[in-house]
Image (cartoon, helix red, strand yellow):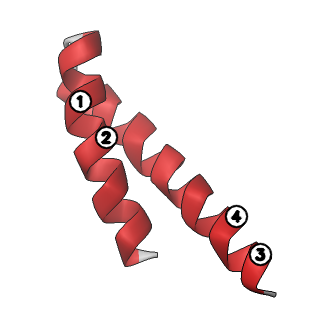
């Protein structure tokens, strides 16, 4: 989960620049990172 959040923050910074809104970008990035983390965990099971 921590890795997903860190990825999300990194993506969030990039999205924040694209959308000119860091808060929205980080929110999207964390959601995206959490989605990746969740899919990775489900594959392990």
Q: Where does residue 4 sit, x and y in percent of width and height?
A: 43, 64
CA gap, disc 3 and disc 2: 23 Å
Q: Which residue is mark 4?
A: 39
Q: Where does residue 25 sit, x and y in percent of width and height?
A: 31, 30
Foreground tag (3 vs 2):
3
Q: Which residue is mark 2?
A: 11
Residue sitting at 37 percent across and 71 percent down?
Answer: 3
Q: Which residue is mark 1?
A: 14
Residue sitting at 51 percent across and 45 percent down?
Answer: 32
CA gap, disc 4 and disc 3: 6 Å
Q: Quadrant of residue 26?
A: top left
Which of 7 and 23 lies nearest the eye of the viewer?
A: 7
Instruction: Decide: few, some or many residues near mark 2? Use Cα within 10 Å; few <14, some 14-19, many ≥20.
Output: many
Q: Which residue is mark 3?
A: 43
Residue sitting at 81 percent across and 87 percent down?
Answer: 45
Q: Mark 2 touching mark 1, by CB under 8 A?
A: yes
Q: Where does residue 23 sit, x and y in percent of width and height?
A: 24, 32
Q: Mark 4 touching mark 3, by CB under 8 A?
A: yes
């Amino acid at each position: 989960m921590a890795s997903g959040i860190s990825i999300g923050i990194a993506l969030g910074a990039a999205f924040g620049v694209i959308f000119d809104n860091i808060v929205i970008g980080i929110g999207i990035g964390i959601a995206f990172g959490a989605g990746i983390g969740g899919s990775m965990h489900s594959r392990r099971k």
